[in-house]
Image (cartoon, rainbow, N blue to C red):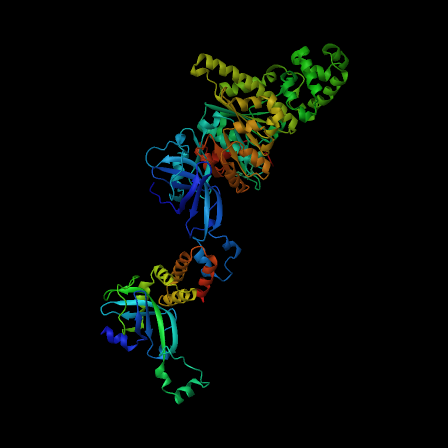
Amino acid sequence: MLYTAAMADYVGEVVLSSTTRLTAQCPDDDATPALGSFVTVDYGPGRAVAVVAEVRSGSLDPGRRPVAFGLSEEELFRQQPQLRELLSTEFEAILVGWSEGDGPARQLLPPRPPRLHRFVSPAEPDDVRTVTEGGDWLRTLLAAEASDDLLAAAVRASLATRPDDHTARLHAGRALARLVGDDYERLQVLLRRVAQ
Amino acid sequence: MIETRQRLGLVTGGSLLDGLEMKLDPGVSTEALRAGQYVVVEGQDHIFYTMITDVRLQSASPSIPIRPPADGDDLLRQVLAGEWTYVTLHLRPLLQLPLVGETDVDSAQVKTVPAHFAAAQRASEDDVSRVFGQQSARDRFHVGAPLDMDTPVCLNLSRFVERSNGIFGKTGTGKTFLTRLVLAGLCHKLPGEVVTLTFDMHNEYGGSARQEGSDRHVPGLKQLFGEQVAVMTLDEESSRRRGAPIDEVVQLAYDDIEPGDIIAMRGELGLSEAGCDTLSLLEGHFGDRWLWQLLHGDPEELVERIGGHLGAVLAARRKLARLAGKDFKRFLHPKLEGSARRAVDTLVKRLAERKQHVVLEFGQVTSLLSYLLVANVVTRKLYAEWVRRAEEFHASLRPQDKPPHLVICVEEAHKFLNPEAARQTSFGQIARELRKYFVSLLIVDQRPSGIDDEILSQLGTRITAQLNDDRDIAAVLAGTTGSAGLRVVLAGLDSKQQALIFGHAVPMPVVLKTRTYNDELFGEIGRIKADVEGTMSAGPDPWG
Ligand SMILES: Nc1ncnc2c1ncn2[C@@H]1O[C@H](COP(=O)(O)OP(=O)(O)OP(=O)(O)O)[C@@H](O)[C@H]1O
Ligand SMILES: [Mg+2]
């Protein structure tokens, strides 16, 4: 059941994975997940939650670089429909949460990397809430060398699942503050981005 | 301790010497705190009573004050609050009591500090009353309540009279009201044990006195305590006119005055060193007729008798001629006959034998010089009498020989106790000798910096209302531990009916809203309102 549900609105298919990151290829250029958004990958049983850390497009064949044609996108694909098959968009996500069965996802890394070719879909708001409870998940992001922009985008995405919780923003801010240690300027920048 | 206290934060550092440092919990507003407020810190076995002496805004990084959050940057502000920007309080430990068991505030000196992270809470009313004792106790008298509290703060009167004490404050802060309150406490709580003599320069203690800023009058000690208080006056005419309830008239004769009485106020008189010597020479030759001789004798004859220079004698005569002036005529006479002669003796009798409290009114005798002279003469005689009685008692050790404890209350105390006068007057002696002879002073003054340092530092209990002058503040706090903290507290006092009390008669310093001198107080003393008013309306309206 879960498998088909995930398949229905999937945003990627795992093509490279480890216990800390995964790379997934998007089925469709128009359905790429946003930077900092939360995705989930099915382990059947179990699922991991990850934060989209980078999205990139390019040629499927690493040896061949796309060249510029000087045409509008519409015109280009009308003239060269085969290009669609040669290009691909993929994203990288940092694993931040794990659930062994059907229970809520927690702030843990999965014990094994996601299986290749599994589908990746947007995370359920409930999973985002449980994984981002407290500030530990930010530490995981930071350990995976997330940039400040990514941190801020991920915090924004996590706050979007708690629209009515007024203290959530403050708690997230405090968690960031603890994370950056005594680098006050960095905190200033981060919070300004979160507040945007 | 059932009442729950409000948590403020926790102890983060400090020392026995410098006091405790405490971090305020985020969410507690600094504006709800005040220097002088009590904070209790619960250690493992002890509860420490401390006083807030400083509130400090801190930031964890030096860049924060340099680049503070912008105006609309609320998130940053909120995130910083409590961890990056926080508030610390400086607490001065005052007392250390065991968490369980008897409260013995006498052995509650602070001997150590609580451990790290001990919880600091706002002191509750229970905490305060645990320390300041029950007002029903024999020698405790309710003089006010801590600011923002209703718990009575009681003065330990037995301890109070053991030493000389001071009541200070700039003009209009309520010194006289406070003094009257303390005197009322002594009359009420320790009758027979303690007697007081008040030199009442402005006629405010015995009969009714006007309350500033209203037409209301408050009853004086005589009205509150009846027979227990005697009002004596130097100026019968004025006292009668005001309808003051006087018991006796006090007059002085020249032979009551000794050169020492004059020399103690030589500054006021402008008397030279040579002048002082002349007075002593005169006394050597003429005994107690020296003053009469100086003022009325033939100067050349005097020089012949005593030696010295005519110029010196003439100068002394000129300076002392003021003693024959208008103000002095009301009470000072070349000679007195009969019962009038013995006014000072009856004063002693009233105090020592009838155990009455005495208020000595000055009426229209308004010059400072008269006040100084009378106070010096009377105090000298009383002191001699008390020393005699005390020595008799120390020899016989019979309880019936023990003189009552005498408290002499003077306003404008710096005039008697400035460094120069303090060496010469009996006031200086009393202030220094402590309780040996059962006499102590209650000095009331608006310029404590004028008082001799040594005497200030001997004061047992200091009650001080608002003071503005830095020198006065420094003088009042001289010789106290942690005076920097108390200085802050003192600076925060309102200009009326608030005072800081510290010293011998209170277990720990306390910032007080002084008890209002009103019906509730008269009720405690056992005089109901109508009763008091009845006595008051007995005479003609003093101000009408
Ligand atoms: N405890 C009190 N109860 C009622 N009224 C008070 C009290 N203390 C002060 N006041 C008010 O403040 C006024 C001034 O007080 P008071 O005369 O005692 O001041 P002071 O310090 O003696 O002034 P000064 O230096 O001029 O003698 C009083 O007239 C009274 O109205
Ligand atoms: Mg006064």
Tell me: residue A125, above or below residue B488. below
Q: Position of residue A40 (x, y in %)?
A: 30, 70
- The quarter of the rendered structure image containing the N terminus of chain B is top left
Q: Quadrant of residue A107?
A: bottom left
Q: Confirm whether residue B227 shows in the render.
A: no
Q: Which residue appears farthest toward the front when viewing the image?
A: A63
Residue at the (42%, 42%) spot, across then down: B13
Residue A177 visible in the current orientation:
yes
Is residue A148 or residue B99 the one in the foreground?
A148
Q: Is residue B259 above or below residue B114?
A: above
Q: Position of residue A77 (x, y in %)?
A: 39, 86
Question: What residue appears at the point 40 percent right and 30 percent down from the top-left corner?
Answer: B106
Left or right of B149? Residue B165 is right
Quadrant location, ligand no. 2:
top right
Towards the viewer: B249 or A92 = A92
A139 or B373: nearer the viewer: A139
Disc count in the image? 0
* Residue A116 lies in quadrant: bottom left
Tell me if B358 is positioned left or right of A40 in this view. right
Residue B398: % across, % down: 43, 14
Quadrant for the C terminus of chain B, please: top right
Locate residue B384, reporting x and y percent. 55, 17
Q: Residue at x 39, y 30 (%)?
A: B107
